Image (spheres, grey):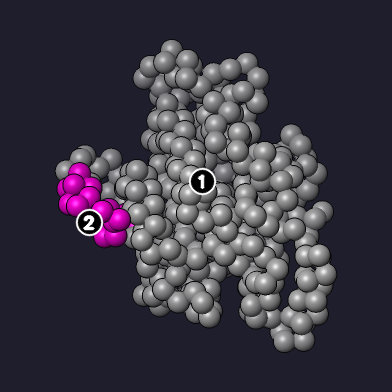
Amino acid sequence: MRWHLLIGCAVLCSITGGGTCGQDALQTHTVLLITIDGLRWQEVFHGAEQGLMDRDAGGVREPDQVRDRFWAESPQERRRRLMPFFWDVIASKGQILGDPSHDFHMRCTNGLYFSYPGYHELLCGFSDAQINSNQKRNNPNQTVLEWLHRRPGFAGRVAAFTSWDVFPFILNRRRSAIYVNAGWQPLEVFRDPAERVPWNSMAAEIPRYWAGVRYDAFTQKGALEYWHVRQPRLLYVALGEPDDWAHAGRYDLYLDATQRCDHYLRQWWDAIQSQRDHTTLIVTTDHGRGDGREGWKSHGKQFAGSDRIWMAVVGPDTPPLGLRKKGTASQSQVAATVASLLGENFPATDARIAPALPGVLDDQRP
Ligand SMILES: [Zn+2]
């Protein structure tokens, strides 16, 4: 049934040159895009790495406690201990892409493998050689958030909550006029207005380990409240702690932050179930990292494996294929995938934009 609708729509689309095609056939009304900065595929697919759960290589303060929490003999059980929601719920109801041991390879194509170029590729759908640093420079290109924000039905309904304070520039807040709450910026929107002062006082009073990255707990709280109050159609939540704890050489805190991110995914799942089941959740990352006792802390073109990433998706239009096998995907395909789930054709606007990922929408079964 839906197959026929989509064929009809595709014909119409080719005649009209795009538009809100697919919207009638799709059940997705809202997309929740979440990134976990610098979370390695190694932990996503294999769980905690034995050789890093010590003082020397991993900077782990209490190795016995960390092993008790995260270690198990089989990689399947280890990854479930680290990310129980990811492996219990998304893996059974959605799709997980990027496991090299099942011959699925998902990569960044920007050649630099650090944050701004990664988020640019992810959100704009292509790489741009001008984007070659993490400096706070306004993005000359349009992200899928900015483009959608100008489409009918999306004005004022696209927003971002980010731990890192460079996102107002990546999303070009000034030009795009998207609501972006980033870094240690106070949280503004709460279901219960009485929560505003205690949350912002807490953020102002606790020690700040990083000047430019707030703890993910604040980003998550702000995003959840905004979601309930403003009901955006595209909400982007950029979590940041795993990358920064890894740079700090603290494998214990990296694992801890990763498990917290998984808990946040479960909070989103509960919010989606109780409020609106027409939401597709996409989770991915900006880059991989290196390997080995030193390499895990860093990333970039000098650290082999930094190009390799992963992605998860679950929603009403996505066939529950579980762990995807035998295939390739690139970071640049995420932007068009987000748009296509909302019935919009982003690649039609610019020849540089990569196509949506095959198999994520019902009509594109591999
Ligand atoms: Zn980093």
Query: Along the horizontal axis of the image, is 121 left or right of 66?
Result: right
Residue sitting nearer the eye, 50 or 86? 86
Range covered by the magenta-colored residues: 182-202
The residue at the point 43 percent across, 48 percent down is: 239
The percent coordinates of residue 337 (x first, y second) are 64, 62
Label 1 neighbour load within 10 Å: few <14, some 14-19, many 20+: many
Disc 2 packing (10 Å; few <14; some 14–19; many ≥20): few
317 left or right of 247 in image = right
Residue at 42% over, 15% down: 65
- Tell me if residue 363 comes above or below residue 248 in the rendering: below
Q: Position of residue 244 (x, y in %)?
A: 40, 41
**Residue depicted at x 51% and y 77%:** 153
Q: Is residue 336 visible?
A: no
* Residue in the picture at 28% in, 40% down: 209
The residue wearing badge 1 is 269
Disc 2, SS? helix
Give the percent coordinates (x, y) of residue 35. 50, 50
Measured in 3D between alpha carbons, the distance from the residue under mark 2 to the one under mark 1, in whole angstroms, is: 24 Å
84 or 120, which is in the foreground? 84
Q: Tell me the kind of residue under disc 2.
A: Pro
Query: Which residue does the numbered mark 2 point to in the structure image?
Result: 193
